[in-house]
Image (cartoon, coloured by chain):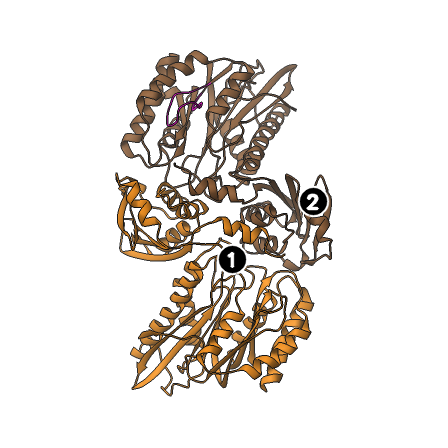
Chain colours: A brown, B orange
Amino acid sequence: MKIIEGGVTAAKGFMASGVEAGIKYENRKDMALVFTEKPAAAAGTFTTNAVKAAPVLWDQQIISKGAPVHAVVLNSGIANACTGAQGKEYNAGMAEAVAEACSVKTEEVLTASTGVIGMQLRMEPIRKGAVLLKEALSDKREAAKAAAEAIMTTDTAPKECAAVFEAQGREVHVGGMSKGSGMIHPNMATMLSVITTDARIGGGLLQETLRDVVGDTFNMISVDRDTSTNDTCLVLANGMSGVPEIKKGTKEYDDFKEALFAVARELAKQMAGDGEGCTKLLEVTVKHAAAVEEAKILSRSVISSNLVKAAVFGCDANWGRILCALGYSGASFDPERVDLYYRSEYGEIQVVKDGMDAAYSEEEATKILSSEKVAVTVDMKQGEAEATAWGCDLTYDYVKINGDYRS
Amino acid sequence: MKIIEGGVTAAKGFMASGVEAGIKYENRKDMALVFTEKPAAAAGTFTTNAVKAAPVLWDQQIISKGAPVHAVVLNSGIANACTGAQGKEYNAGMAEAVAEACSVKTEEVLTASTGVIGMQLRMEPIRKGAVLLKEALSDKREAAKAAAEAIMTTDTAPKECAAVFEAQGREVHVGGMSKGSGMIHPNMATMLSVITTDARIGGGLLQETLRDVVGDTFNMISVDRDTSTNDTCLVLANGMSGVPEIKKGTKEYDDFKEALFAVARELAKQMAGDGEGCTKLLEVTVKHAAAVEEAKILSRSVISSNLVKAAVFGCDANWGRILCALGYSGASFDPERVDLYYRSEYGEIQVVKDGMDAAYSEEEATKILSSEKVAVTVDMKQGEAEATAWGCDLTYDYVKINGDYRS
């Protein structure tokens, strides 16, 4: 398996487009389409928030039926959450407009929205956008990028990744896109991600695989501990690689899962590293924990702490806040065995030994923390389990962006 | 019952002092003492963080024995957390120094510390401070204030409150002090609070009463969702009001609990309103919830949300973030029944009706949100339960304070 340049059009038979529909703002791409001529098996994971956006409810219904799909239409600017019956109607209208333009059935079109909560979509730009999207569809690299750009809100860069592996002498591709970058604390999925693959795989197995992968990737990032109303991760598999159906327990399945994992993890890291207002990607690995679930809880607690995030912003090796965040995570452990290290391209330093100050150089630690990618390793010295979570620093710009997001 | 001017010396027989011991900084009060000549029944609630500071472990042991106590010594600057066996020794040394100075037993002295994690106390200033504290002891109003000032870290004002009620023709007092103002998301107690009373009440009943009261007061505030390693709330009852022992099920008990509740709630509100860097106190009341526990979970989720807090800072009536925070709280409810109101001294406005936009005036909402005290009322329209939580806004100064706290 190797990572390649590309996004949602890396897999054979997938086309994409991104256009300016004028959903909420002028002069920016705000509607995206991912399309496959050949019907695709689809899997999805969605927000666990009790307040679910209209497109989330729509997709859950379609995915649960297990029927193949042809398209995913996405818009930015308006989240279509807290919009009642009217919002559900508008969402169905969005699917219908795309279905008409692309000559497929409405129930073969998945939807996703991101933006302000509580505002209704207007159907005129949506209908206009659907036609533009159909016209712009292409399997080119640029088309994937246009789609990735069209789903951005406060993101500062589009997020894409693709991977390829060989099976039975043929290439199988997995490619995806996603968007952040606030209200990010995914639980079951992340704020809008679409992954495509030309592998042939049954919907049930695809769903099971996605759930596993999401648990170790998108669900391990946090920007602000706010689990969105719209979190959606979709995978479409159209089988066009020509490789026969991938079954569980085969080398092909392991390779496919590895590729899906690699793409999802890279997209997740891109989202964490582009968290609202952030200046640094923070990677926290908890190793030698008693169990994987504990390692996950511990690492997520650290990347979610405002105090840890602010200290990372200030390049302050204030490790007491990390110990504190481990301590209130809910996982049980012996605080007096914990070792802790900071690492970046500027070096590595141990700051805690057996739960206490390791008599390190503050100057050296500050230097290491001045990197744009800071890694923390926590050694629990308890067992064999390990997990990694990704977050970002808390900055003035986070406050600025979110003190004045709607205007 | 009425609230009166005062702090930990409001109750008869309690003396206090606050002095400059030079724990970490020069020229600021950093050591406090609360003392009662007559031994007092003591109760305490403590952090649930798995990483517990040395003074927390010390107090838990003393309180669990049920023996009477004479004093609480507190220091700011160094938290004495993550300090191992040496830290425990230094903490015992702090209790011992005060015991010697005040001619009581070491195990009759409770301790509390707040400040930087991972740094060892130095015993020289502690010993010097113990003597100064003893010399400065007084039952005057100013002495209580000096003690409240000495436990401040990033607090901008001391936090005190007192109440009085009448029982059998005599006055019974409850007075307390506390400190915030970061790493505040108490779970079982709050970051250092000492409450004194001249009521006579058994240790067991006092503990039970405190636990109840803390659950509705200190445990309902949050500044940054970080549960500290040092959270401690202590109550000392020396019986000097002259009123016979207060028993459960009597009017005297109800009055006592009401007074304790009033003092604890006021101290909790003062802490929330003085959260690090904050400009506003945010009060969130969830009413007509299915159960009290649900109402608590819902209200706490809203005051803990970074996105809600940043919107409040920006006077932005972005109610979608409140619905979102209700949704991911873990409580189950029907999002399409929720009503939501903002209120301050500038008026009241309904912004959500049945889970959707109530077509309100943004201008009016912004005006209401420009107050220093903003109240949000969420009507779940499900049952009869209600709960209130207190928090604050998320500001540039929070990031500033915590990006550079140790230097």
Residue A94 position by quadrant: top left
In this rendered view, identify the residue nearer to me: A19 or A161.
Answer: A19
Q: How many marks?
A: 2
Q: Say if the magenta span includes residue A104.
A: no
Q: Residue at x 54, y 51 (%)?
A: B400
Q: Amino acid at mark 2?
A: Ile
Q: Secondary structure at mark 2?
A: helix
Q: Residue at x 67, y 72 (%)?
A: B89
Question: To which residue does mark 2 refer?
Answer: A368
Q: Residue at x 60, y 48 (%)?
A: A314
Residue B394 in the image: x percent, y percent? 46, 49
Relative to A131, is B238 above or below? below
Residue B320 in the image: x percent, y percent? 36, 40
The answer to whether any part of residue B259 appears in the image is yes
Q: Say if the magenta span includes residue A20.
A: yes
Q: Amino acid at mark 1?
A: Gly
Q: Secondary structure at mark 1?
A: loop
Residue A88 in the image: x percent, y percent? 31, 29
Q: Given the image, what chain letter belongs to the residue carrying mark 2?
A: A
**Circles 1 and 2 on the same subunit:** no
Quadrant containing the C terminus of chain B is bottom right
Q: How dense is the environment of label 1, judged by Cα within 10 Å: few (below 14), some, or many (20 and up)? A: many
Q: Given the image, what chain letter belongs to the residue carrying mark 1?
A: B
Dominant secondary structure of the residues highlighted in magenta in the image: loop
Cα distance, mark 1 to mark 2?
26 Å
Q: Residue at x 61, y 63 (%)?
A: B81
Question: To which residue does mark 1 refer?
Answer: B182
